Amino acid sequence: MELLTVLGGTAFAGLFPRGISQYAIGGILIGLGVSTIYLGTAITPGASTFFESTLSYVSRIPRFNRAKYLVSRDWRIVFTLSMVAGAAVYALTLGGGGWTTDVQAWRLLVGGVLVGVGTRLGKGCTSGHGINGIASLSGTSFANVATFMLTAIGAALSMQALGVSP
């Protein structure tokens, strides 16, 4: 039975035409992964720190060579590559194979750059604030997640109003 029906969310069925179960399963897996990393290392995982810690391999700039980056950079590379590998495995096995979006590659690139800039301005990424920060009851993370969501909703509605499609 579909999770939306169980929760009495038939009004939301139009928002999730393919169902909500895969999102619930993904959320559980993310929670387990984050918990495992935290319990094993006492470090809260987040994707944006990967970029700064990786730059410590090639840069002498003190910002990128802080002790916290040097001690965690190896597992952060494994963490980030595992996210990419997980998406690839899904796309090739359950997702119909290969490319799974209608969004043009240049738009994905521009969006990725904007997200990267935003993660530095927001002192972390959506995964760090949304999963770890909220779970830790961080006021900064609550404010950042609200900002992320309001900005994303505003951007999506603006693009829709302008007639922009993927």
Image: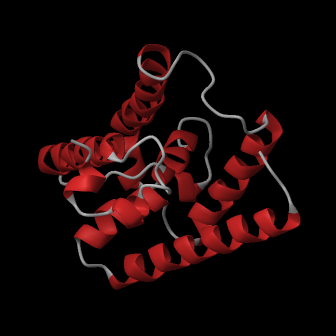
Residue 19 higher or lower than 163, as above or below: above
- Residue 105: quarter of image: top right
Q: Is residue 155 left or right of residue 68?
A: right
Residue pictured at 82% horizontal, 39% vertical: 106
Number of marks: 0
Judge by depth and name the residue closer to the eye, 40 or 110: 110
Residue 75 higher or lower than 88, as above or below: below
Q: How is the image coloured?
A: secondary structure
- Residue 108: quarter of image: top right
Q: Is residue 137 left or right of residue 57?
A: left
| Quarter of the image where the N terminus is located | top left
Q: Is residue 57 visible?
A: yes
Q: Measuring from the top left, give residue 166's x and y in whole percent.
A: 77, 45
Q: Is residue 43 visible?
A: no
Q: Residue furthest left?
A: 39
Q: Measuring from the top left, give residue 146's x and y in whole percent.
A: 48, 79
Judge by depth and name the residue closer to the eye, 7 or 46: 7
Q: Measuring from the top left, give residue 80's x and y in whole percent.
A: 44, 36
Q: Is residue 149 left or right of residue 79?
A: right
Residue pictured at 72% horizontal, 51% vertical: 111
Residue pictured at 40% horizontal, 65% vertical: 11
- Residue 103: quarter of image: top right
Residue 9 higher or lower than 51, as above or below: below
Residue pictured at 12% horizontal, 49% vertical: 39
Q: Measuring from the top left, give residue 135's x and y in whole percent.
A: 24, 68
